[in-house]
Image (cartoon, grey):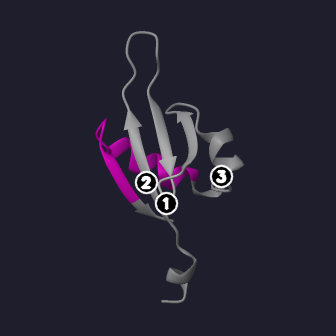
Amino acid sequence: MFALAFMKTYYLLKIKGKAKIPDYVQMRDDQFTLLAYFRLDRPEKSLTRIGLGEKEGEILSILEKMQFGKVQQIEL
């Protein structure tokens, strides 16, 4: 129960690219403010910038299972 006090809610949106435009991800907070917008194949710099670099593996595993165009709520 103590760990739940430090968990934050985030929303992920996986966006399918077309032709030469790559796939992207939007990461938003509980107020739906855009925190990060990054290429699906290059998340490192953006996640480190918002302080979630250590959670990169967990976030990528969630993104692998997600469908394009769907919003996913996560707790980190």
The answer to whether residue 10 is above or below residue 5 is above
Question: Residue 33 location in percent, x, y?
Answer: 53, 51
Q: CA distance from mark 3 to mark 2?
A: 16 Å
What residue lies at 63% left-to-right and 55% top-to-bottom?
Answer: 52
Question: Residue 6 location in percent, x, y?
Answer: 58, 77
Q: Earlier in the sequence, mark 1 or mark 2?
A: 2
Q: Which residues are magenta?
A: 56-73
Please, what secondary structure does the residue beneath circle 2 have?
A: strand
Question: Tag 2: residue type?
Answer: Tyr
Q: Residues within 10 Å of mark 3 (few under 14, many from 20)?
A: some
Q: Which numbered disc, 1 or 2, marks the residue closer to the eye?
A: 1
Q: Is residue 18 magenta?
A: no
**Residue at label 3?**
53
Q: Answer whether labels 1 and 3 touch (C-beta < 8 Å).
A: no
Q: Is residue 68 magenta?
A: yes
Q: Residue lying at the far bottom in this picture: please name it.
A: 1
Q: Which numbered disc, 3 or 2, marks the residue closer to the eye?
A: 2
Q: CA distance from mark 1 to mark 3?
A: 21 Å
Q: Earlier in the sequence, mark 3 or mark 2?
A: 2
**Residue at label 1?**
31
Question: Tag 3: residue type?
Answer: Gly
Q: Nearer the viewer, residue 53 or 17?
A: 17
